[in-house]
Amino acid sequence: MRVTIVGPGYVGLPSAVVFAGLGHHVFLLGNIPEQVERLQKGEIHLHEPGLAESFRDLVREGKIVPTLSYADAIPSADVVVIAVGTPSGKYGEADLRYVFAAVRDLAEHLSDYTVVAMKSTVPVGTAEKVREIISAVILSSPPPLAGPRWKRWAKDLDSSPPKADQNDRPITFDVASCPEFLREGTALFDTKNPDRIVIGVTSDKARDLLLELHQELPGERVVTDPKSAECIKYASNAFLATKISFINEIANICEGVGADVTEVARGMGLDSRIGSKFLKAGLGWSGSCFPKDVRALHHIAFSNNYEPQILKAAIEVNNDQRRRLVAKLHAALGGDLQGKTIAILGLAFKPHTDDIRESAAIDLIYLLQQKGAHVRVHDPVARPDDRDVFKDVRFMDSAQDAVRDADAVVIATEWPEFKELDWRALRAIVRNPFIADGRNLLDPKLMRAAGWKYASVGRP
Ligand SMILES: NC(=O)c1ccc[n+]([C@@H]2O[C@H](COP(=O)([O-])OP(=O)(O)OC[C@H]3O[C@@H](n4cnc5c(N)ncnc54)[C@H](O)[C@@H]3O)[C@@H](O)[C@H]2O)c1
């Protein structure tokens, strides 16, 4: 099967590798010339374990063809997968400008029957809008793109599409919703081993093509309508975010009563109705998906006259987790952070990725700078972008350089490397041995034995 993936990012790249690995021919369409030039040499521009090697091999074998050209990548495709970004807009809504731009461009190059499958996380009803956009582009194009019978069908979208013939070659297409559930850091494994594959379609033809595309992959198939598929993605992310906020709320109660949230979570998680995943207390959820997706669902609810109470509370608890950690630093440093040097270990939103979008570390930097603190950061792979919040931050090449002469240390990302550090030796070079472990990464007893004043989240 010929598959074109639009958007060579954290989702598009692993998808390209997995589909090509299954034997499909993959075009990978990008929009940034320097990025695509690197991809054509077999090099990727992001950090994701195992991805670079597989990608390089598949490009060399000609199984993945990175390109900037819609004219090359679209006409022959059986399925076009949209995997461009959908960041937050001004009011928390999903900003669909990249999706719609890609759809307009691809619509001009459709030839035979094609399924346009949305992997980007998009608001409920987007598949329908995408179909309208493609129809409008085709209608405004000269024949043979828009033959008269096809034009009649495009105006009356409920009728069945006409059959192609020699003289009047209608462009037929379907738009489907195929949301993605991979996690950065384990993206390749997740894409190869999905728990479920959600296929939201309005026609049997699109269903059959998408089932064939995913044929070799494990996991339940959930074949449904596009709106339900779009909603499944938001509901799943919002549920996981809420689960994290819930355990953080319990952690905050544990701090009041002297219980240990890791013990509480273990005891809860062994109940099969609850499950142990996403019950880790800490600085809260962050990253390129949960924050924007929870905001977007909140916005969708409001736009449809429903005030979501649980989502609102989950967001508030999450924001509070960052503030609570800064309050612990504030209290530990005598009630004044002005002029104090804080070393933050971790900038990525989670370990094993270089993605810093909406990371907890960025919120901490902002809150600490507001209180007049000087901030140093070390992360094993993530690097700062050109955001204003980083203007006065010093980025250090090692944890030792970050910690030297600091007034306090914060763990913001649970990189395994931080666990392996020689904390006794770091104790000797820090000015004040206070550490706020925002990810409950380290062992409180060992840290105290190494001479640190140690605070974590929900643990005595
Ligand atoms: N990152 C994740 O963990 C994850 C997981 C599940 C779902 N998603 C969803 O998948 C979508 C993509 O996320 P991502 O993290 O891969 O984004 P990303 O920003 O890493 O990648 C998007 C890519 O699309 C490219 N692009 C933008 N407009 C384009 C166009 N018109 N033509 C060709 N390329 C274009 C960008 O240059 C970029 O390379 C989002 O909707 C996100 O919510 C992400």
Image (tube, rainbow, N blue to C red):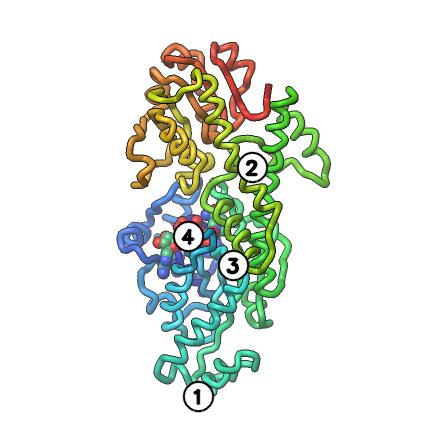
The mark that comes first in sequence, 1 or 3, is 3
Disc 2 to disc 4, how far (Cα)? 21 Å
Q: Position of residue 428 (x, y in %)?
A: 39, 10
* Marker count (numbered): 4
Mark closer to the observer (1, 3): 3
Secondary structure at numbered mark 1: helix
Q: Quadrant of residue 167?
A: bottom left
**Residue pointed to by mark 1:** 148
Helix, strand or loop status at disc 4 = loop
Q: Residues within 10 Å of mark 2 (few under 14, many from 20)?
A: many
List x then y, in percent, for residue 439: 51, 28
Q: Which residue is mark 4?
A: 90
Q: Position of residue 243 (x, y in %)?
A: 61, 40
Pointer 1 with pointer 2, Cβ within 8 A = no
Which of the two labelled residues, at mark 2 and mark 4, occupies the earlier sequence position?
Answer: 4
For marks 3 and 2, the one nearer the N-term is 3
Q: Amino acid at mark 3?
A: Pro
- For mark 2, what is the residue? 317
Numbered disc 3: secondary structure? loop
From the top left corner, tell me how far across and down residue 91 is, in percent: 45, 52
Q: Which residue is mark 3?
A: 123
